[in-house]
Each structure stands twice: as C-alpha cells, then as structure tokens.
Image: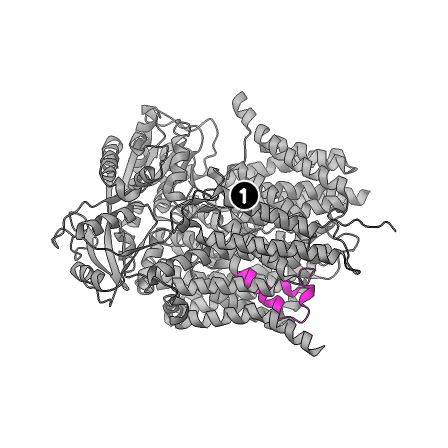
Amino acid sequence: MKKNVKRIWSLLLVFMMVLSLAACGGGKQKTDTTDKTSTDTEATTVDTTEDTTAEETTGWIPAKPIHIVNQSEAGSGTDLFVRTLQPWLQQELGVAIVCDSAPGSGGKIAATQLWNANPDGYALLAHSSPLTTVTEISKDCEYHIPDFEHIISFDVTPYAVGVKKGSDIESIDDLIAATRTQKVSNANSGLGGAQYLQSMIMKDALGIEYDEVPYNGSAPCGLAVMNGDTTITVVAIDTLLNNSAEIEVLAVLADERYEAAPDVPTIKELGYDFPCLTMRRGIVAPPGTPPEVVDRLIEAFAVAVETPEFQEYAANTKVMLDIKLGDEYQAINQEYYDTVMQYVDYLR
Amino acid sequence: MTEMFQGLLSALAPINLLYMFVGTFVGIVIGALPGLGATTGIAVLIPLTFGMEPAKALLLAAGIYQGAIYGGSITAVLLGIPGTPTNTATCFDGYPLSRKGRGYEALGASMTASAVGGFFSSLCLLLFTQLISKLVLFFGAPEQFMMAMVGLGVIAASSGESLAKGVLSGFFGLAVACIGYDAITGYDRFTFGSVYLMDGVEFMVVAVGMFGLSQAIVLAEEARTIAGDTKLTGSLMDGVKAVFKYWRITLQSTVLGIVLGITPGAGGSAACMLAYTTAQNGAEDKETFGTGNIKGVIAPEAANNATIGTAIIPTLAFGIPGSPTAAVLMGLLMIHNIIPGPRLFTESSGTLYTFFWGLIFTCFALVIIGLPLLKFFAKVTIVPYQILVPAITILCCIGAYSSRGYLFDVFLMIFFAIIGYFLKKAKYPLVCFVLGLILGPTAETNLMRSHIIYGNLSFMYTRPITLGLLIMLIVVTASPFVKKYKQEKSK
Amino acid sequence: MKEKKNSYLEAIMAAFIMFFVAAMAIDGFDLPMDAIKYPIFVFCIVAAAGIFVIVQTIKASKGADYKPVQPFENRKNFLVICGLIIGYIIVMYLLGYIISSIIFAILTAWYFKYEHMLAFSIGVAIASLGIYYCFVKLLYIFLPTGLLLNKLF
C-alpha cells in the first residue's frame, strides 16, 4: 500500500514539475526579454490583477486582459499586425493583450462573435474591410459593420492583377484578347470575398469572362499563378510584390499608383475606369461600447502604431500605412458598405 | 559557402546553444500537452521576442518547433493521446507497447526516430533550399489531388482482413470531412444548423477523443494500469537501437516526410499516417501492426519531424507556408525583418544559416533532453488507473477545449470517443478513418479546382507527375487484390 | 463455460455509420447539386460498404469458427465512466473548470475504490489549480469559467 502512495506522489510530482517547468520556460523567456529589450517591456510581465499601475491619462483603465479576435488564422497579415503591436499596446494599457483567432467563413464567425460580445472593451475584432462587409451582405449575417465602434485602421492596400513572369499576357489588353481565344482562370482568395467581388466588377467593366478558382486566402493565390495553375490572380498587391521574382503585376486597381510599386500603372491610366475596392485592416469594438473606453483604446493604438518597429515591419512587408482613427474609419466602412450594396447582384 | 560556415560558428556559440536547449525543452512540454502544439508555441513566442536579436528568436522557435512535434509522441505512447495531430499514428503501436510494459522501448524509439528524421530534413533545408524551392512549383492542384488520392488508395491496402470494413471506415472519414464550409462553392455543408460546425470538425478534437479518451474508458472498464500485469521491461536504449536496426523503415519514413513537407497542403499529419501505412504494408509481420510493433512507432515519428525542415522551404522561398506552424514561423521571421521571397538569401543569409544549423542541432538536443526526462515519464504506465483515468480525461477535455474555446468541441470529442471505442471493439481499422478525415478535403478541393481550370478531367493523364501518381494509385489500390489472387492460385 | 451471445457489433456499427451519413444527407437536402456532387458519391460508397459489412457479419455468424465480438468487458464500469464523463462536462459548463475537475476526479477515484482518498483529493485540488494557473495566467489559454458562477458574480 505504501507503494501506491509513493506512486501518487510521484505522478503528482511529475505533473507539477512538468507544469512548473513549462511555466518557468515561459517565464524565462519573459525575463530574457526584459533584460534585452531596449523598449520598456515591464508590461509583458504585468499580471492581470485588479491593482494595475495608475495611468497618467484619465479615462478608462482596463482591469483584465483584452482579447483581440482575428478573423483570419495565426500567421496571416491581419494577425501579424496585431502581434507586432501587442507589446506596445500592453505597455500603453497596462494589461495583457491576448491575440485570438476565429477564422472561417470569410470573417463571418469572428464578426458574429464580436457583434454579440459584451461591449466592455475587453474584446475587440481585428478584421479586414471590405471583406467582412462583403460577407455580411452575401451571407445574410446578423452583424452590420458600420454599426461597430471603430478604433483604428492601419493600412490601405489596393488589389492588383498578377501573372506569372514570362507569361504571354503582358498587359491588360493582352488579357482581354486572351479571354476571347483561350481558357483563362483567376485565382481568388475565397468565393464571395472582397477580392472575388473586385474580380467580378472588373469582368463586368471590361466585358470579359474567365473562370474563378477559389483558394483559401491570398498567399495560395500567388502560388497558384507561380506554378501555372491559373492564368491570373486578382489579389491584394502586397502578396504579389512579396514574390516579385516570379510574378509580374499588370496593373494596380486603384486611383493612384502604389508607393511600394511605383512602376506599376493604375487601371485608370490604362484607360479603364471602374470602381476599385481597397483593403483596409483594422480594429473595431462591439456596438455600444462606452465612449470613454473607445477613446482610450484609440489613444493607445495611435501611440502603438507610431513606434519605429511597427513602421519598419510595414515597410518590409510592402504595406502602406494609412492610419485612420475612430469616426474617420467609420465613415470609410460606411462608404464600403454603400459601394458593395451597389454590386449586391454579384453576390447572391 | 562562407555564410554557411559562419552560420555554423554562430550556432555553436554557447549562448545560442542555450537558447536552442531552452526552446527544445519548452517545445517538448508544449507538444506533450494535447491541444497545444508547435503552432501555439511559436505564436505565443512572437511578442516575447521583440528586442531579441533575430538569430536568438529563431533558435528558440527552431527548438520549439522540433520539440513540439516530438513532444506529442510522449503522451501518444504513454497515454494513447496524440499531443499534436502529427502524432496520431504513433498512438496505434506506441500505446499498445506501453500496455505491454514496453513503454521505455517505445519512448526511446520515438525520440531517436524524431531526431533522425528531423536531422535529415534540416540537412536538406541547409543544403538544398534553392533547388527544392524550384520543385515546389511543380506541384499544382492536379498533382496535389493525385497525391491525396494515392494516400486514400492506401486505405484499401490497410484494411486488414475485411476490405469492406476498411472502405466503410475510410469513407466515413471522408464523409465527416465534408462537414463545414466548402471553399469551392461557398456553401456551409452538413452543419446541422450549428455555428460550431461551420468550420468543420476539428481534427485534434476527433483524434484526442477517438484515441485518447476512448482508451481511458477502456482503462476504467478493465480496471488496470496501462502496463497491466506486466512489469516495466526493456530500456530506452532498446528503442534507440531499434531505430538503427530497422534502418530501412527509418530511412523510408524520413524520405516520405521530406517529400510531403515540401508539397503544400500535406503536412505532418498526412506524413505520419502515410509513413505508418507504408511501413505496415511493406513489412512481413504486418498483422502485428496495431498490437505493439516497434516499427509502427519509428515510421510516423521519423516522418513527422522530417516534414519540419522541408515545410520551411516554400515558406522561405515564396512566403507560402507549408503548414500552419510554418505560417506562424513566417510571421516571426517577418517581424524580425527576414522577409521571405527572392531577396531572402541575399539579404539575411547570416541569420538564416544560423537558424538552419539550429534546426539541425535541436535534433541532438531532443536526445540529450529526452534521455533523463523519459525515464521519469515512463513511470506513468504503472500509476493506478483510478488516478490515471480522471487525469487523462481532464487532459483530453483541456485539449479539445483549447483549440477553439468552445465546450461544443468537448462534447464532440466525447462523441467520437464513444464511437471510437465501439469501432475498435468491432475491429474497424481506425487508420482508414483518419486517412479519410485528413486527406478528404485536400482531395476534393484540388479535384474541383483542377476541374474548373481544365474544364474536364484531362489533367489526370496529360501532366507527367500526375500521370505517374495515377499509375502509383492504381498499383497501390490493386496490390491487396493481386496478392490475394496470387495466394489463392498457389494453394 | 458460458455461451457467448452474438452481439453483431460490426453490423450495428455499420448501421450507425450509415445512419449518421443519412442524417448528414438529410441536413444537406436543400443544397444545390454542385455543392454536393462529391459528398453524394462518398455517401453512396458508405451505403454500399455498410450493407456489405452487415451481410458479411450475418453470414459469418452462422459459420462454425465464428468468434463473436464482445462490446464490453465490463458493462457496468463502462456505463459508469461514460456517465461520469458526461456529468463532468455538464458541471464544467455550469461551475467552471476547477470545481468540476476536482469533483469529477474525486468521484471517479472513489467509485473505483481507490484507497488513499485524502491524499488524492489534496493532490487533485493542487493539480487543478496548477493547471488553471499555467494555462490561463501564463499561456493565456482560457478554460471554461462556468455559466452559473458568471451569473452569480
């Protein structure tokens, strides 16, 4: 019988050792960071207790961790934005920032979850417009993007048309001609998504037809063009620029040239004029979140995006920053909604 | 060449070795806890590495990646719970070995197989990145479809005595895989109106339930410790030696893992299953697979660590992650200004080579850390079931809950646990079910895509690689029938 | 020696699988043809294989050297443990992770006649709190907090 007692204790010991070592493993990394970082990172080890350090600013003081729920999975563009900002947000707000993902269904799952969440400032949605708006309209969702409380929008990323380098199609005119003589296919990042809608708008305006081949997300679209699966892809331009050795960008679908790709002509310069959606990634809060909470969050994010590390990250990944806060962002999303509604027929 | 050498020197610096070891250790622990895996580990790591030199951050990540894919095998062998989806196949023979009291041997074998597989894969990464990255471009939608079909064709060969049961099991897996949002048509299919099923059934939930919880129920029913009446026999070194004794299996599984790591969409879970079934079909003692054949531990463990090095290749070359873990790893790289793509080798080669060497050295770290730890862990198999059953149940529930944070997943896990319990008793090959569940979506999506692109099914025979795979498919599916026919003839 | 009754477990499981798949098909009835071409193919094979297995099982059970498959080694234990597990999840939903885990572990060990209940109970309490701490506070992976508790506090 003594043997059994020994066994329990040894099992418990093993269990606790494993867990405490995991804890130490995590803890060790945190202390390492504190030693080595140049920026102030005490906040990363701040535990989520009721007594947070008093903030100099007045207004809402968060008392427990804030969850930022992403509409795409870990490692995606939107997710990485949030993770890059996390340490400075933590420092600003004094509580832990937790990055969650609720991917799927074109953002419907995450947006619906946050639409119904408690408007207390502890759960935020990280999403990309107009994707969630397009999903909202095409899938009869219960949420309405313009009614969320808007915090901040980070970037403005237009869509562009990409082909494999060395392809016969070297311009938009070539593309138009090709659709009449051969089977042309377009890799889109998801049926019923914003990039898909842009492709439909373009087809309509140019009077051409090609097949739509859906993929999960933007990155596989770039690969589809590179390995010859599809002829073209209409996708966010940063995906195309990050693979510039294998992909040629025929035109950027915007009113102005993209700063990180100054040689790429706009579709308007080439003589074709149709509405161009641009992708904006940003953070919103559930409707009904109190104004002082929203203001404090806006302040914190505004500070976090000014840090050199974030700016450098954006530059390295060919993303153009265009920070819009609060009401400005809300106006943009409202505009997106109105624009997309004009094309609702493509989506139903 | 000189950068490679510089990278080596840098990786050998004591402080960097320390980072590797810490990363590997943390990775093993994270991997062992079901529900946490390399993906979560690296994702949590990202914000902690701000301000760290990129090389050190990457060495930590390398350790976590390698350690986590290995760590899941510990619970797979000892408790029958796959710690990560890539350790599913390890449960099939690893857990029966523990039940026979041979836990030490199984643990030793899985550790060594993981180290060997990871080593060769990381070596490929170090030496052949540029070359292999060009190969990635040969695998379009038709090739991926056909590869998934070959994997499914293996169902026929792995059915054991009853082909019908194998097919039923496999197609049940295919059917369950159809639940959820279909990317090709944009519809939510077979979700029974539940918002929780909109994204499909999460594989970890099924695996933890079918293999982990169902075995806990068996333990309670049989009222025995895992090792049962047998004492703990054998030693870690027996397992280590087995990896070299059966070097053909180790080599074959490593190659399989390396190849599957490169192809986007396959990944560690498919690799471990296919390595397992390939080893089973090629062995003379194939009937003993599933009852505790050490080869059934070596094959999947070598394969899953062998996917690590090569899954990083498309991530680095094109910014297209070869697996969800690679996606998060890519995020880590980008945050530290290592941008995947053509500029990578010209701009950041120093740090990159340190990272590659780090991946190689972490394989050794696996063994160095593993030896003392495993001796301790194996004692779990002689702990009384009254403690173990609740402990395993709690672990499984945490594992099911933590993937998405829904209690629904926990109920789903219990559902599959009970189904798995009865299916196993009725001698249905669960291997086939898992194959269907993992490979079904890839097969269907790529079939549909190819069909849209070509407008017909000509892609199956007009492309060289696809044609070759089609022939392989026919051979693999026909082989059990051919064998049977030959047997009948010789009687 | 007791004559072992025929359980037809293989056939029952085949029927279960077919039933499950049929439920899926009924749920997906209103989906357009395009979306379910492939699933219908899969369901048909399931139906065919299922019928085959059922027929095979019945035929084999009439054979001389048929060994019937036993679903349970010990039916009582099986039902008890399943009941405990399902109860555990329900309590977890209501009262949260820590309390439900402690109750579940103690009840299970007590039912299966474990001798050192006091030491075990203390150990379980420590382990549950330890797990909660590690997962929630350190790794920020949140465990269920319980509906009733949330309503009360």
At label 1, which amino acid type do we have? Ala
Instruction: Specify the subunit that label 1 lies on.
Output: C
Q: Secondary structure at mark 1?
A: helix
Q: In the displayed orientation, state which residue is furthest to the top.
A: C152
Is any part of residue A129 visible from this angle?
Answer: yes
Question: Mark 1, residues whose alpha carbon is within 10 Å: few (<14), some, or many (≥20)?
Answer: some
Label 1, on which residue? C23
Most foreground residue, A79 or A254: A254
Most foreground residue, B144 or A297: B144
Q: What range is drawn magenta here?
A: B271-296
Q: In the displayed orientation, state which residue is furthest to the right.
A: C1
Q: Residue at x 34, y 28 (%)?
A: A287
Q: Percent position (x, y) of residue B425?
A: 70, 51
Q: Quick check: B194 above or below C57?
A: above
Q: Percent position (x, y) of residue B162?
A: 65, 61
Q: Quadrant of the C terminus of chain B?
A: bottom right
Q: Percent position (x, y) of residue A43?
A: 41, 37
Asked whether, in this view, residue A107 is left or right of residue C47, the answer is: left
Most foreground residue, A157 or B333: A157
